[in-house]
Image (cartoon, rainbow, N blue to C red):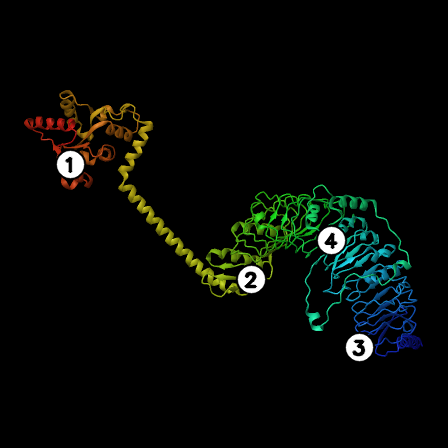
Amino acid sequence: MELRFFAVAVLSVLIQIGENVERCPFEKRCRCFNFSNNIHADCSNLGLKLSPDFWANVTRIDLSHNNLTQLPDRKKIPDNLTHLDLSHNSISAFRNFSFKGLFKLTVLKLNSNKFRLTNKLSINVFADLINIKTLDLSENTELTFRILPFLAYGLQFSTISTLSLNKIHCTFGLGTEIKKDDIRYLNNTNLTEIHLSSNRIELLENGTSDYFPKTVKRISIAENRLTFGLYVLHLGALKDLEWINASLQYLSHSPIDIIISNKICRDERRKEYLINTQDYSYGRVHKTNETAKLLVRYKNKTGGNFTRSSQRNELLNSKNEVQPLPPNIKTVFYNKSALRFEIPRLKSNENKLEELYIQDNILYSWTGPVLGMERLRVLNMSNNFCSSVSKSFFKHLGNLSELYLSDNLLGFSLSPDTEGEIFASLKNLTHLELRANRITHLPNQIFKGLRSIKDLVLADNTLSTIDFSISTLKNLQFLDVSGNQIEFLSETNMKDVDQQADKVSFTLNLLRNPISCNCKTLSFLQWMIKRHDTKKISFKSFEKYSCATSSQGKPIMFSKIKDYMQKLEKECNSYTYLIIILSFIILLFFVILLCGLLYRYRWKLRYFYFMTKSRYHGYKAVRSESQSDFKYDAFVSYADDDFPFVQKMMLELEENNGIRLCIHHRDFVPGYDICENIITAVNKSKKTIAILSPNFIKSSWCMYELHIAKMEDIYSRENEGVLLLVFYDAVPVDKIPLSIMDLINQRSYIEFPNDEHADSIFWRRLCNSINDEFLS
């Protein structure tokens, strides 16, 4: 029983819905829907040329994308209609009573038609739309701004909130100026959004902004031909304005559609209004005191004409004037608008500006500073051909969180900034883009002030290494250096990145860099693969990475890098061993060569060492102040076992012939280095007598004295014959060292005869040899 009752109830509801659906329009192809007792009729995309009839219970009608050439007859439209969409048709004219009695209509879409104004159009054509919220007349290129008085007058007491008049002027027509009289009655509305894009607007008549509704929050006036005018100074009067889009000024459009349709724009020069303005009175809205003051000030300064570039630059470069901004403005778009000047010192009134987009202009030099925009969070100044930015430009923009500076020439200004002054004030910045700025080098401390930075984009520059410090960027999570000239990361870079990855989830983008695959970069490649496999570091699109081999072959894709790495590691290990062996051999060769040279020139080196030392810490007992005077006539070099012969020599030469001898047993000063005593004795003696004997040959000190005397003869006496050789006792030839044999072969020598009669001759010859300048 209960099941039967439920089935009957469901059937009743379906019958009721079916009755509502059937009663939607007379056109059977239309689709109708019932939402909370509101019937929606969807008759779009049916190729209709005439509007069908609709029942009175229909509240929404969609007739878009058909072939309608005229507005539906008012009799076919229900009085309770709330939404009417007639967009994308071919309707060309308004009817004076088309919207009569549609008091409940809230949304009216008439965009993308062919509307034109006619002389018979009533000023009250929109007057009954008292509950309208959204009205869209965009994409009616022959409508022109002559429709504004009809809209302003008809909608002045309505609830209109959004008015869209985009592209109601011919794309290739003459420039447009919006007159005060066009929008005078809009001041009585509560509009919050006005869209006037793509209308070839060049100027707004002075004071026009005073007639904009004070409630307006969003204005789109993009894709026009705006020039600098006095209206810029009036923007401060729009107290509630939060969002303005004035981008794409002087944008070039394609003429293809005009050529294909063979339709040339009619002359759109300003004409007399089709409406006799004397038939109704305009309400006057007086300028605010603030605006009036600005008008007087700048009219006196420029004669009221702001179109000349010299006056425009004078105003922009003024250092004393406050640049007016709406006090509640939050977002401004002025990108791609052919702005071309240097940004001087600027100061604005107090405002709430948070986002400023002025990219794609020609703001070639940023001098600043910019004052009065302390709340700015997002700033986009990309693609402005800027090559110079001062160190104080961002000084008062410390609240910035996103900064876009790509596609400029800032490498010239950033490279010399070794102290990081340009970005020093941006403590809250989290996102910085410096893509394509011809940056070849960045100082180590360039980003030291960016304590909050998370995303740093340096792609498409010419960096070969990462010179700036990563360790100071404590919160860095994403580093993009793609499209540079980086072949590998240094050990310091890899260490810094690892430390950063230990603290945060870190992503590194090295795509489109000429990464090398060779033994030099092996540790870097191993580091990349290991970090990717362990997911410690995220490499964006890792499988698309490639590296070039030294043989200039086909690049190795990282999707297949592991197979190549095994081969590379073997080659590099063999190569490493080879380098070690060759290095050891070369080192050993140089050690042997050095030892040979030291041995070969050991006496010379010793001589020069002790001569240099004796000049500063010399042997005072032997040394005299005059280097040309000799203290001794001869220094006797002998072995201790031959001292009896030396005693006899002392008797014969000193006592009998008055020759001064230097005998080490007697004349060497105790406490001084033996080598120093020997050097000093040889240096301060006119001759050095070597008493050759088997004992002399065996004595290392005697050999040392002999070689020192030889060095003295060569380097200090210029081969004067300092050394005298005396054979006291016969020495076997095979026992005589080669160095002594060279001396024996090169010099004369005296043999001690050890004969009573011949001894006197020996002593006389020895005395003569000592006293003569050269040994004869």
Q: In the rendering, which numbered label is found on residue 47? A: 3
Where disc 2 sits, the SS reads loop
Question: Mark 2 to mark 1: distance in Å?
Answer: 80 Å
- Residue position marked by numbered label 1 in the rendering: 747
- Residue position marked by numbered label 2 in the rendering: 545
Question: Mark 4 to mark 3: distance in Å?
Answer: 41 Å
- Residue 204 visible in the current orientation: yes
Name the one closer to the observer, 428 or 100.
100
Question: Mark 4 to mark 1: distance in Å?
Answer: 103 Å
Where disc 1 sits, the SS reads loop
Q: In the rendering, which numbered label is found on residue 332? A: 4
Q: Amino acid at mark 1?
A: Arg
Horizontal arrangement in the rendering, residue 374 relative to residue 491 (left or right): right
- Marks 2/4 in contact by CB < 8 Å: the verdict is no
Question: Mark 1 to mark 3: distance in Å?
Answer: 130 Å
Of labels 4 and 1, the one closer to you: 4
N-terminal-most mark, 4 or 3: 3
N-terminal-most mark, 4 or 1: 4
User: Quadrant location of residue 297?
Assistant: top right
Check the picture and name the quadrant holding the C terminus: top left
Up-down relation of residue 366 to residue 692 (above or below) = below
Q: Residue 167 placed where, x, y %?
A: 76, 64
Q: Amino acid at mark 4?
A: Val
Name the one closer to the observer, 99 or 243.
99
- Marks 4/3 in contact by CB < 8 Å: the verdict is no
Of labels 1 and 3, the one closer to you: 3
Horizontal arrangement in the rendering, residue 278 relative to residue 675 (left or right): right
Q: Residue 583 placed where, x, y %?
A: 38, 52
User: Image point 8% across, 26% down: which residue?
Assistant: 760
Q: Amino acid at mark 2?
A: Tyr
Residue found at the very far left of the displayed protein: 757
Where disc 3 sits, the SS reads loop
